[in-house]
Every structure is written in C-alpha cells, then in structure tokens.
Image: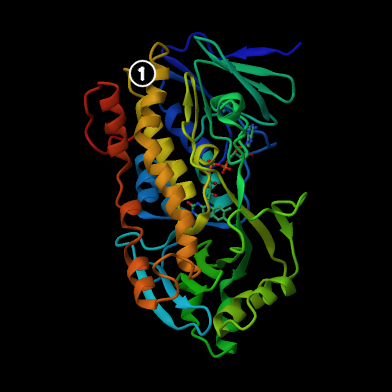
Amino acid sequence: MSSINTACPTSPRLTVSIVGGGIGGVALAVALSRDAGLDVQVFEAAAQFSEIGAGVSFGPNAVRAISLLGLEAPYRRIADASPAPFEDVWFEWRRGSDDGYLTATLAPGCGQSSVHRADFLDAIVAHLPEGIAHFGKRCVEVTQDGDSATARFDDGTSFRADILIGFDGIKSAVREHVLPPVQHGEIAPFWSGTYAYRGMIPTQQLEAALEARGGDRRLALVPQMYLGRDRHILTFPVKQSQLINMVAFITDRSTPHPELPAGEEWVQAVSQAEMLSVFEGWGAASQAILGCIAEPTRWALHELPELPRYHRDRVLIVGDAAHALVPHQGAGAGQALEDAYVLASLLTDEACDRGNADRVLGAFEAARHARTCKVQRTSHEAGDVYEFAAAGIGDDEARLIENLETRFDWLWNHDPHSDVQAARQVLNWAPVPPHRSA
Ligand SMILES: Cc1cc2nc3c(=O)[nH]c(=O)nc-3n(C[C@H](O)[C@H](O)[C@H](O)COP(=O)(O)OP(=O)(O)OC[C@H]3O[C@@H](n4cnc5c(N)ncnc54)[C@H](O)[C@@H]3O)c2cc1C
C-alpha cells in the first residue's frame, strides 16, 4: 500500500507542494520558503537538481522578476553581459548569406543578460532550505478533494498538501488533472517544425576561427543573429565570456502541421556534417561558428497550444507545464520566473490561507493567462520573422529592421508586479506598493 505523507500539521497557514524542480520550481520554492507561515515541499523526478550545459538568455522583464524574487545578487555573480561599448545590445542582426549588418535590438540597462543554465540553477538551489527537496519523485497522478490536493509518485508514495503547483515542464503530468481529456480532449506538445542544433564554443577558438575566415573577432562576444530563409543562427557569451552559446535553427514550413517522424527522440546527437549541410552557402561567420561545433545535438522544438485554463480548484500549472513555447524571443524561462514571482507574492500574503487558496490560484490565472498566451504566440511569430516567413515582412530588409527594433518592447517593458496588483484586484485585496520583494 502506498504511504501518504502529509505536510507538517503545525503549519500555521498553508501547505504547498511543488511538482518539478527546474528553474521555475526552485525559484518559487526559494521565495515561498522565506515565509514561516508556509510549509513548502518540492518533488523532482530526477535524482538531483540538474540542468543542461547550455546558455539561457533573459530579457529585462526576466531580470526584473529575478530581482523581485530576491535572487539578483546570485544572478549578477554569474551573469554575462554584452561587452563595452555594446552593453545595451540584445542582439545584432545580420544576413546569414554574407554577414551584412541589418540592425541591433537594444535593451537599455540590460543588453544580453545570460547565464549558463546549470550555474544558474546551482546558484538558486543554494538558497533553498535543507530538507524540502525530494528526489526520484516522478509524479504520475494528481487527485484532490475539497480540502487538499495529492500527488502520487512512481515509487508508490504520495503527498498531500493544501495546494499543488505543477512546475513540471512541457511534458507535465499535472496538466492532465487540470485539463481532463474527457472535457478538453488530449492536450499534447506539438513539434513546431523547427530543429535546433546546439553547441558551446570556447571564445578564443571562435575568435580565431572568425579571423581565419577574414571575419571580425568582435562577432564572437557581441551577441549575433544571422538570418536566412527557413534558417537562422544565434550566438551569445556565457560562463564569464569563456564560452559562446550557439543555436542554429532550421524550419520545415512545407506543411501547416509538420510531424516528427514516428519514434524520433526530441534530442539527438548528430554529425557536424549534417549541420554544415543545412547551412551550405552561408557566409564566413556562420561557417566559422558551425566549424567549431564538432559534436552538435539536435533538438526538435516543441510547444503547447494556448491552454484554456491553468487552474483547477487547488491545483495550478505554471511555467512550461502551462505555456511551453519556442525559444525565439528568449522568453520561456523568463515567463516561468514571472509566474514564480507573481504566485509567491500572492501566496505569501497573510490574507492567503487554506480557506481561500483555490481562489488565489484562480486570481493568478486571471492575471497571467493573456500575457503568457501572447508570449507563446509572438515567440512562434518571431521565428517566422527571423526566417523571412512572416506575412507582410518576408525578406524585405526595411520591414525586418523595423520589426526587430520594436517587437520586444511590450514583452520587456512589463512589470510583473502589475500582475500581482491585477490578481489582488480580482481577490478584492488592497493594492500593495510596487516592488515589494516576494
Ligand atoms: C533550445 C532552447 C533554448 C531556450 N532558450 C531560452 C532562453 O534563452 N531564454 C528563456 O527564457 N528560455 C529559453 N528556453 C525555454 C526555457 O528553457 C524553458 O521555458 C524553461 O526551462 C521552463 O522552466 P520550467 O521550470 O517551467 O520547466 P523545466 O525547466 O522544464 O523544469 C521542469 C522540471 O520538472 C521535472 N519534472 C518533469 N516531469 C516531472 C514529474 N512528472 N514529476 C516530477 N518532476 C518532473 C523535470 O525533471 C524538471 O526538473 C529555451 C528552450 C529551448 C528548448
């Protein structure tokens, strides 16, 4: 018989279980565990917290969320920035065919703020209290009654708490409970039609390779996007500029609903020759970059349809579990962090307790749903823009430049605290001053 553990009964206000310990789940757990009135437990399927050794880039809104979550100091210690005098440059945009400069997108005061994923996860895990993380706990089923929500794990154990937060990524197990197939049909991630080749290059190696091909070594450290039909390549520095993170994309637009060949793994090791053949005929910088990646991996990029809801009574899905998207605006982890901040601000309010927590989760959904759906939608559209496939833009350089210089403003200028205020309004709670740390 399975053992049912329950959160500490002496917990004064609310018990919270978080399923999934990725960037979003850990950030939420850190913020909630600062409130002595909450009992927080994290359940992670893997044997330890882990992230892949690739880069992740954050826009100004994501950096704002990190700061509001009280994680700015550990972030700043490991974050890379665009080198002077390009501090405000998010990306420079170039033609893939000949490296010709198109424009730069500026993010004043932020630029390209990026980290090595594993370093970032380690930095925030260091702020988790001892004993609240549980590993080897793959959630396989969620149930709830009027008073509590229970996660059942594949090792036969279960855990019951007042509320359950599904931060368990694009293949979320919690999602099926929130959106039962009998009511909503099968909701599954779908292939976007895009493959992403990924790799990391020692900065000095890339600088030498660029010079050897008659290119500008500056293109190694200043973040770059090289654009072409159905393809694009990006580079930005991580690990205190010791490494350059590289992603090269190719998209199948031959059918409206491309399908991954049956049985194909989402992530595969592939040959350098395959990747080079995709970008045959591209300019010197692209050849230099790809020539440095001896053993690329190829990711079939999946996304979720916009979901009708994220919340069912005492259970909520957030982050990629709720709104997984393609990475073309560098926004998925940023949305997970915004979710974490907004949710932590609401759950740590003394007005939130086991009597009204389900309403609080509903208010969170009301405040976040439109924005996260728009980020999903515009992320997909961004891929079309970069790959000359956007309606009304195509490969018209003047239109491309206009779009690239302005398309991120609404995303980056957002203050996640305004979502907190919106949710509080739904709850009839008084506004709190902006930038109260969660
Ligand atoms: C190629 C690529 C590049 C990207 N680049 C960027 C970028 O530059 N900027 C950006 O902001 N975003 C980027 N993203 C998106 C970003 O990686 C995700 O949006 C982000 O990691 C989502 O965080 P999360 O915590 O919601 O989910 P995840 O990071 O997926 O974490 C989910 C966690 O839950 C665990 N888990 C899964 N199932 C279960 C279960 N059943 N029970 C218990 N635990 C479970 C997993 O092991 C994992 O630890 C990129 C994505 C890709 C694919």
For disc 1, the neighbor class at 10 Å (few under 14, some 14 to 19, many from 20) is some
Q: Tell me: 130 left or right of 299.
A: left
**Residue hosting label 1:** 352
- Looking at the image, can residue 238 be seen? yes
Q: Which quadrant would the N terminus be assigned to in this image?
A: top right
Quick check: 29 above or below 145?
A: below
* Residue at left offset 40%, top offset 47%: 374
| Spot occupied by residue 274 in the image (x, y as percentages of width and height) | 73, 71
Q: Which quadrant would the C terminus be assigned to in this image?
A: top left
Q: Amino acid at mark 1?
A: Cys
Q: Residue pushed farthest front? A: 255
Q: Quadrant of ligand 1?
A: top right
Q: What scheme was used to colour the molecule?
A: rainbow
| Spot occupied by residue 305 in the image (x, y as percentages of width and height) | 53, 43
* Residue at left offset 44%, top offset 75%: 395
| Spot occupied by residue 61 in the image (x, y as percentages of width and height) | 35, 50
* Residue at left offset 35%, top offset 52%: 411
Given residues 10 and 362, the one toward you in this image is 362
- Looking at the image, can residue 37 be seen? no
Given residues 9 and 98, the one toward you in this image is 98
* Residue at left offset 67%, top offset 71%: 293
Which quadrant of the figure has residue 149? Answer: top right
Given residues 149 and 188, the one toward you in this image is 188
Which quadrant of the figure has residue 437? Answer: top left
| Spot occupied by residue 210 in the image (x, y as percentages of width and height) | 56, 83
In the structure shown, which secondary structural element does the residue marked by tag 1 occupy? loop
